[in-house]
Amino acid sequence: MPISPDQGSTGGGTTVTITGTNLSGATAVHFGSNLATITANTATSVTVTSPSGSGTVNVTVTTPGGTSNPLPFYYVGAPFKSSLSPVSGVTAGGNTVTITGTGLSTATAVDFGTVSATPTVVSDSQLTVTVPAGTAAGPVGVTVTTAGGTNNGLSYTYVNAPTLGTPVPASGPTSGGTAVTLPGTNLTTTQSVTFGGATAPFSVISDTEISAVTPPGTAGAADVVVTTTGGSVTLTGGFTYTAGPGI
């Protein structure tokens, strides 16, 4: 007499189907000492809503013909999430997030706002999930669903990809040291700025402006790359290094 699923939330409410023979006219289904609510019944199956409980209990079906042999049912506590990393990423999704906590081994879904993703369970204390695309930039709640129930309380922030305009000034000496203003959008979470592949010191002035100092470079046009938590943007040949005079 199989039972499916054979585990559920300690709070009850799990829909459980018990299959076997001579089950018609079921008058009671016990989970341990607690009665379940029968929602459907045929000669070969009984569907019930599990009562609350804890640990491992025996499930039995009672009909006018007697009481069945017991089957084990495992109560699972609701998950507890302690951290999420990273806490932000591109609105297009696709990056991998790690969630740690307890009671995660039976996780079946992770919701980012209203969008659901299927996790990979690493252990009872850790899972990973590929972030789905967001509907808009901004924070969303993160909810984990397991056999023991759901738990939320963590937040993930979707960030739009950055854009870049023409640097001011757009040229400077190969020795570097030129203070440059980089206009654009979605620049608040800037992590790095490079000129021709060389890292430049920078300061975020606002979501639409970065101040950077050019590193030394080679004469000619150099790509300017700004990387944020929302992605990277490349301004091809955006800054020109000029060689000093020689005699």
Image: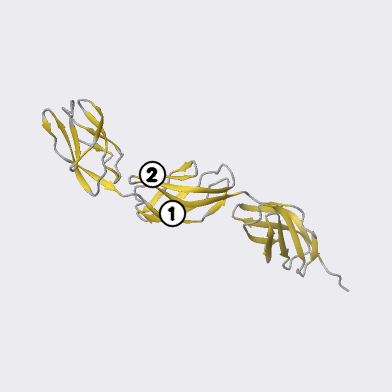
- Residue bearing the label numbered 2: 108
Residue 199 visible? The answer is no
Q: Which residue lies most toward the left here?
A: 66
Residue at the image point whose x is 34% and y is 52% from the top: 103
The quadrant in which residue 175 appears is: bottom right
| First reached walking from the N terminus: tag 2 or tag 1 | 1
The secondary structure type at the circle numbered 1 is strand
Q: How is the image coloured?
A: secondary structure
The secondary structure type at the circle numbered 2 is loop
The quadrant in which residue 71 appears is: top left
Q: Is residue 13 above or below residue 81?
A: above
The quadrant in which residue 81 appears is: bottom left
In the rendered image, the quadrant that contains the N terminus is top left
Q: Say which of 151 and 70 sits in front.
A: 151
Residue 14 visible? The answer is yes
Q: Which residue lies most toward the right here?
A: 247
- Residue bearing the label numbered 1: 99
Report how far apart the C-alphas of labels 2 and 1 lie in the structure: 13 Å
In the rendered image, the quadrant that contains the C terminus is bottom right
